Amino acid sequence: MLQVIFVTLLSFFVLPGSLIADAASQAAGIGGDMAATQNLGSVPTAFLVIISTIFACSVYALRKQSVHERENYLLAYTNRLTNLPNFGWFEYEIPSIIRKYSLEREAGKLFIVKMKSQRLESLKSTYDRDSIVKGIVELTKKLREENSWIRELSISSEMSQLYLLCCLPDGMTHEEAGMKIVSDGDAMHVGSYSFRMKYSAGIAKVPSNGDFDIVDLMNAADTARVAATDKKETVGIYNEEIRKKKLLQKSIENLAPKALANGEFKVWLQPKYDILRQQTVGAEALVRWQSPELGFLMPVSFIGLFEKNGFIIELDYYMLEQAFKIQQERLAAGMRVVPISVNQSGLHSSESGYLQRMRTIADKYGLPKGSIDLEITETVFVDFETKESRESTVRAVDELRNMGFTVSMDDFCTGYSSIAMLQNLSVDVMKIDRAMLVAAEESERGRRLLREVIRMGKSMDMQVLCEGIEKREHEALLIENGCTYGQGFYFKKPAPAEEFFRILDSFGGTR
Ligand code: C2E
Ligand code: MG
Ligand code: MG
C-alpha cells in the first residue's frame, strides 16, 4: 500500500512538471529542435512513472499474496482451539527442522514421541471447552519449560494427542525421557481442579543418517505406543521386534479373506464334561488357522486384530456354519451328537442385520433345539450403559433362544456387569472364568466367592460350568462347591474336530 501511495505522489509531482516545461517551451516559440529535446526529456520521466507504478503494484500484489499465504499456512497448520501447531505442521515442517539439528541427529539423539491421554475425552464431557483448552495450553507450556530438550510440539485436532520432536539429554535413556514427559504432563488443571491425564507414549528414534520418511517415523512412534498399551506399559520404544510384529499383523490382515475362502480356518473342539461322571457332554469350537504362508496360528495371534478390523464377524459366521455342518452330518449318519458351542464376538451386538442372518442360518440347517450353543462375553456383548441398550441386548438374547440356540455367558466374573447380567438376561449356561478357580485355589476368600457364584448361577436355573481345569485338585474343589460341569486341559485339550469325534465315538467321550 505504501508503495502505491509513494508512486501516486511521485506521478503527481513529476508528471505535471514535464507538461509545464512542454507548454512553456511551446509558448516561448522556441524552435523545433529545442521543443523536440524538451519532449524527449519528458519520455524518461513518464517511463519512470510507469515502471515505478508497475513495480509498486507488483510489490503490493506480492505482499498481499504472502499475507494471504501466511494466513492459509496458519489456518492449515494451527490447532484452532489452542493455537498450537497441529499434526499437519509436524509432518510438513519437521523434516527441515531435523536438518537444522544435524549434529544432534548424527549423534543419534533425535527422537519423536507420540503421546495420547486416556482421560481427556471423559473430562471434555464434564467440563466446559474453554477451561479444558486453557488447561491444555498451560500443560504443554509447562512441559516445554521443564524439558528444554523438547524441541517441537504439535497437538491433534481433538487435543488428546501430541507429537514431539526431542533431543535426548545427556545421561538419560529414551525410556527415562519418555517417562519424564509422561509424568511432567500428567497433571492438568481445569478451573480449580487438578486431573491426572494418564498417557500412553511411544518413541521412534530418528535415524542418525540417510533418508527418512517423517510419516513412517510418526507411525512408528504410534505403533510403539499401541504395543506398550497392549503390554499394559506406559512408554514403548519402536524396535525390530515391534517392526516384525507389525509386518506380521499386516500379513495376517491381508491374508485373512483368502484364508477364509480357502478353508484355512479349522474347527478345533474341546470337550465340556460332567466332572462326576467324567463324560463329555458338549464341546467348544475354537478356531485355529493353518496358513500356508504363516504357519499354524492360535487365536491369540489374530482374534484381537480381527476384532479391530471387523473381520471377526465373517470368521464367526464361518465357524458357526462349520459347527452346523458337523452336527447335520452326524445327525444324518445317526451318530452321537453333543451340543457344540461357538464363540460370538462382541462386535455382533452392534452389527446391523445380525439377528436376521442368524435366523437364516438356523433355518437353513433346521437342527433340533440346543444343537448349537452361543458363547457370548458379558463385557463386550452385553452393554448395560443405557436402558435402551440393555433392553435391546435382552431382546436379542431372547430372540436367539427362540431360534433354537442356547446361550452361554462366557468368562463370567471377568467383567463388571456380571451381577447386572444375572438380573436382566435369561441365559442357559454360566461359564465361570478360570481366574475364579485360580483365586479359589489361593485363598479362603476366593473359595467362598466361587461357592457363592456357583450357588447364584444354579438358583437362577443356569447350568454352571467352570473353565480352565488343569488338575485333579481343581475338579475336587469344584465338586466340593457344587459345580459339576467343567472344561479344561486336565480332561482334554482342544483337538481337531476329527480327533475329538474319534475319541467320542470310540470311548464314549470319557477321559
Ligand atoms: P474362550 O472362549 O474363553 O476359550 C477358552 C480358552 O481357554 C481356549 O483358548 C482354550 O484352549 C483355553 N483353555 C481350555 N482349557 C484350559 C485350561 O485348562 N487352562 C488354560 N490355561 N486354558 C484353557 P484358545 O483356543 O486359545 O482361545 C482363546 C480365545 O479366543 C477364546 O477364549 C475365545 O475368546 C477366542 N476364540 C476362539 N475361537 C473363536 C471364534 O471362533 N470366534 C471368536 N469370536 N472368538 C474365538
Ligand atoms: Mg468361549
Ligand atoms: Mg472363556
Image (spheres, helix red, strand yellow):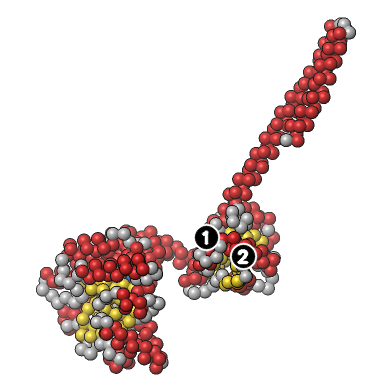
Q: Quadrant of residue 402?
A: bottom left
- Ligand 1 within 8 Å of disc 1? The answer is no
- Residue 139 visible to an observer of this rendering: yes
Residue at image location 60% in from the left, 71% down from the top = 193
Quadrant where the image shows the C terminus: bottom left
Q: Secondary structure at mark 2?
A: helix
Residue at the image point whose x is 29% and y is 70% from the top: 394
Specify whether 250 is left or right of 284: right
Report the amino acid beneath label 1.
Asn
Crowding at dot 1, Cα within 10 Å, few <14 / some 14-19 / many 20+, comes out as: some
Residue 287 visible to the viewer: no
Of marks 1 and 2, the one in the foreground: 2
In percent of width and height, residue 296 lies at 34, 70
Residue at 69 percent of width and 32 percent of height: 58
Total residue callouts: 2
Q: Quadrant of the N terminus?
A: top right
Q: Position of residue 132 (x, y in %)?
A: 58, 63
Q: Residues within 10 Å of mark 2 (few under 14, many from 20)?
A: many
Q: Which residue is mark 2?
A: 135
Is 151 left, or right, of 340 in this rendering?
right
Image marks 1 and 2: residues in contact by CB distance under 8 Å:
no
| Residue 273 percent location from the top left of the image | 24, 83
Q: Is 325 located above or below residue 61 in the figure?
A: below
SS state under label 1: helix
Which sits in the foreground, 179 or 54?
Answer: 54
Q: 12 and 501: which one is in front?
A: 12
Quarter of the image where one finds residue 84: bottom right
Q: Answer with the quarter of the image where residue 274 lies.
A: bottom left
Tell me, for residue 249, which label it has, or none: none
Question: Which residue corresponds to mark 1?
Answer: 219
Identify which residue is drawn at 15% across, 71% down: 368
* Label 2 CB-ligand 1 distance < 8 A: no
